[in-house]
Image (spheres, helix red, strand yellow):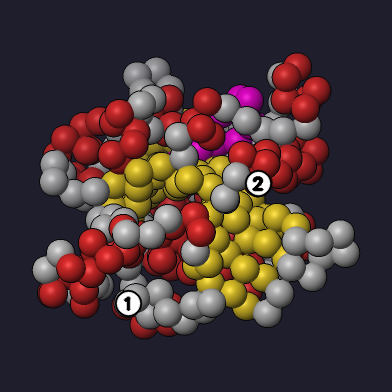
Amino acid sequence: MVYVPLMPQRLTGGMMRMAWRRFDQSAASLGRIGSLEVRLARSSEEVKQAQRLRYRVFYEEMSAVANARAAFFGRDADPYDKICDHLLVLDHDAPEGPEIVGTYRLLRQEIAERRKGFYSSGEFQVAPLIDRHAGRSFLELGRSCVLKPYRTKRTVELLWHGIWSYVRRNDIDVMIGCASLEGTDPRRLAPLLGFLRSYAPTPEEWRVKALPGRGVPLDAMSAEPVNGIKVLRELPPLIKGYLRLGAYICEEAVVDWQFGTTDVFIVLPLERINTRYINYYGPDASRYAA
C-alpha cells in the first residue's frame, strides 16, 4: 500500500495545527453550495433540531422503534449527543428560515476515552483496534441522515466536505463507525453482506469483531454467486460512499433490533482514501469553502 500525503500542513510542523485550534470550530462555516451550508451545531437548540430530523428519518420513515421518551418529544436522543460534535447541513432558503436538512454525529477518540467510550462499542469490540494502533487518532462517524427531498448529490457532497474539513482540522488518522442495512433478517440480506465481505476485505491489523454472541459472519449464508451490479444498486448510498472512498468492511454484522437494521463496521484509514476524492475536495478541504 502506498501512503498518500494528505496534509501538506504536516510538513510545516505544528504551526498550522495550532492555528486551526485557536478558534472555536463551531463558529466556522465548513462549506457552502448555493443556499446549503455545512457547519457544526452552535447551540443545544440546534442539536435538538438535528435530533428531530433523526426521529423523522429513523422512526417515522424507517422502522426504528421509539421508546416512550423519544415518542413524546419527537427526538432521537441518547447520552452520546452531549459529548459529540454534530455536523449539520442547513438550507438558508427554506420557507421558515434556515432549516437543518442533514446531519452526522462525530466523536473524537480523545473525548470518547474521557467519557463513555465509542458508541459502536455497544455492538463491536473496538478497543483492540485502538490498542493495535496506539498513537493514531480515531474519529467515530454515526447517526447520519438527510431529509428526503434533500437526498441529492450536492447535499451528500457537503456532508463529506464537512467531515473532510473536520478531519483535517483535528488531525484525524482513522475514521470508524457502523453503517446500516435496513432489515433484521441476515438471510434476506445475505447477497449484500456477502458482496461487502468480498469487495472490501479487511486485513488482520484493521479487523474488528462483533461483541461475543452478537456477530453474523458476512459470508455465512451466501450460498449463490453474487450479482455485483445488482447488489451495488441495492446498497444504501452511505455504504456505497464508504466503498468508493476505500473503506474496509469488517467480517461480522450485528442486528440492531431497536433501529430495525443490520449493522456492519467500517474502518477507513486516511491513507486508504482514494486520491480522486482528495483532489476533488482539496487536501485542505477548500473546494466548497465558504
Quadrant position of residue 237 = bottom right
- Disc assigned to residue 46: 2
Vertical arrangement, residue 238 with respect to residue 153, above or below: above
The reply to whether the magenta stretch includes residue 263 is: yes
Quadrant position of residue 59 = top right
Q: Residue at x 57, y 64 (%)?
A: 38
Q: Earlier in the sequence, mark 2 or mark 1?
A: 2
Vertical arrangement, residue 48 with respect to residue 153, above or below: above
Q: Mark 1 highlights which residue?
A: 283
Quadrant position of residue 199 = bottom left
Say which quadrant the N terminus sits in.
bottom left
Q: Secondary structure at mark 2?
A: helix
Which SS type dominates the magenta stretch?
strand
Q: Secondary structure at mark 1?
A: loop
**Residue 19 appears in the picture as rendered:** yes
Write down the region rendered in magenta.
255-264
59 displayed left or right of 241: right
Q: Residue at x 47, y 81 (%)?
A: 287
217 displayed left or right of 201: right
Vertical arrangement, residue 138 with respect to residue 77, above or below: below
Amino acid type at image mark 2: Glu
Residue 161: image location, x then y, percent? 48, 69
Contact between marks 2 and 1 (CB within 8 A): the answer is: no
